[in-house]
Image (cartoon, coloured by chain):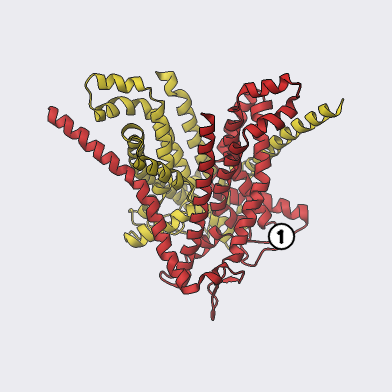
Chain colours: A red, B yellow
Amino acid sequence: MKARRRFWNQFFEKSLTASAFISIAILLGIFILLATNGWKAFQDVGLEEFLSLERWNPSAYDTPSYGLGALLLGTALTTLGAIAIAAPLGVGMAFFLAEIAPVRLRNVLKPAVELMAAVPSVVMGFAGIVVVGPFLAQLFGLPNGLNALNGAILLAFMALPTIVSVSEDVVQAVPRTYKEASYALGANRWETLVQVTLPACYSGLLAAVMLGVGRAIGETMTVLMATGNATAVPTSFFSSVRTLTATVAIEMGEVPTGTTHYYVLFACALVLFIITLIINIVAEQIATQLRRKGQ
Amino acid sequence: MNLRTFWMRLGLASLVVCTLIVVAFMAALLFDLSWQGIPVLSWEFLTEFPQKGMTEGGIWPAIFGTTAVTLLATLLAAPLGVACAVWLEEYAGEGWLTQLTRAAVRNLAGVPSIVYGLFGLALFVQGMRMGASVLASACTLALLTLPAVIATTQEALRQVPRSLREGALALGATRWETTYSIVLPAALPGILTGVILALSRAAGETAPILFTGVAFYTRYLPASLFDEFMALPYHLYILATQHHEPEAVRPIAYGTAITLLLLVFLLNLGAFILRAQYHPKKRL
């Protein structure tokens, strides 16, 4: 009886440890798979052509070209646009919820915003086609509203739940004594907010925005549906753009396995994977420093 | 009114404006989707196959496909995720392996879903020769939801008071007996909440199933794990962008969008209620 209990105890300790290795194995597996397949693309195409602004035209009949420049610009344009919209709105709303809103309003609004994170990206993309697109077209007198701006707006609202939720926690965590000291010195609410609370939670807000960016940069279906997918080098927010993610989604289903084009798409995914990894690590670094400062 | 008061009013008002913009956008979006989508919903719409090039009929195979793949993915992800979380919280010390596992889980959560799609294509569809199938898609979605299941389970385990574990150990239970009969039951509502949220995430994802098994149209429901299937998010995508008569299928696209949205919101509501009702602090 005793031996059996000890056996099961040992058995589960070993098997649980094994299960923990799985997450490491998956992350490594993804990297190795993308790297080995992507590497073949670098050999075939060369780094120079990859990073050039040469047109992305992998299915051209005579000389296919694989310039990632326009696609990287597409990703950059939609993501940066999304940050420009989401960061001020998100931080502003977080301050409203934490500092101004009555508790009951806050307890309704915060879960409501967090629920928005559950809206599937394909539904956001559909909204881009039927709501945001026509609105932009009418507002700016464009033939259609499928452009970088549309993608940026939708991505902003997909990043907002993360930004609002994390920022609100950060603002709430600022010790009350800071504010009380500021009021005691005669500062009003706005002066206290800008000169005391904001500096105190600056790095936390940065981490919140970074987490939102991480989500925006990897988004696929929304930008695929809402930005028009032209492969030309974008000239403004009203240009139709195609992101890295959308390119993989559109073309992967149609390329024959083992061709240069196939490997190039893996290289695109590798670039994406590395960018999001860096963003996550940096955001985590900021958060760790914060925790240390908190102690 | 002096200048300082003026700036204060302006500043605080700008925060209100930020909030109003966010709320107005969300409301406009939900209003448009419900206004045009809800009238389309009917028993026939939910239970019939698409007809006449998808311009008529229902979305039953897409509902069935999404349900089957999502449930299968969760069945695969839940045991693995819970096991990993139990190891991290109950067994692991503060060693390098623990640190590495934590970092891996965190970074997996940030990997774009399209990258999971490529990984699933290369590993499950081609590497393990599953072909484009229900099984390959479910495996890919399981990987995608794994980090979320781990994180929520860890959170639930952390809420269980230490005194419960100490009591069990003091009575002579082994570590596994303590975990299995004391800690896991106490954390169960929290774990279930996480699993439901994982279900809702998997149901709405399109990019991971794009190359691993979803089909534009199937004449029959998938009969085995190795068949292709239709899914709600992909159905919405093709109706909105790939159909040759986008205007003719717009009502059906709205109906599909609202069905998907309702499904996801109901799952989230379930998780919310579960969490509110069985909050571990209240129970113990």
Above or below — where is B25 with respect to B233?
Answer: above
**Residue that badge 1 annotates:** A236
Question: Under tag 1, what secondary structure?
Answer: loop
Q: Nearer the viewer, residue A226 or A46?
A: A46
Q: Residues within 10 Å of mark 1 (few under 14, many from 20)?
A: few
| Residue A239 in view here | yes
Q: Residue at x 39, y 41 (%)?
A: B99
Give the side of residue A62 with respect to residue B76, left or right: right
Q: Position of residue B100 (x, y in %)?
A: 38, 44
Q: Position of residue B30 (x, y in %)?
A: 62, 41
Above or below — where is A173 with respect to A124?
Answer: above
Instruction: Identify the amino acid type marked 1.
Output: Ser
Q: Nearer the viewer, residue A176 or B212?
A: A176
Q: Chain of mark 1?
A: A
Q: Position of residue B106 (x, y in %)?
A: 45, 43
Which residue is the extreme one toward the bottom?
A: A62
Give the side of residue A86 with respect to residue A21, left or right: right
Q: Residue at x 70, y 63 (%)?
A: A235
Give the side of residue B16 with respect to residue B2, left or right: left
**Quadrant housing residue B241:** bottom right
Q: Position of residue A239 (x, y in %)?
A: 69, 61
| Residue B209 in view here | no
Which residue is the extreme one toward the right?
A: B1
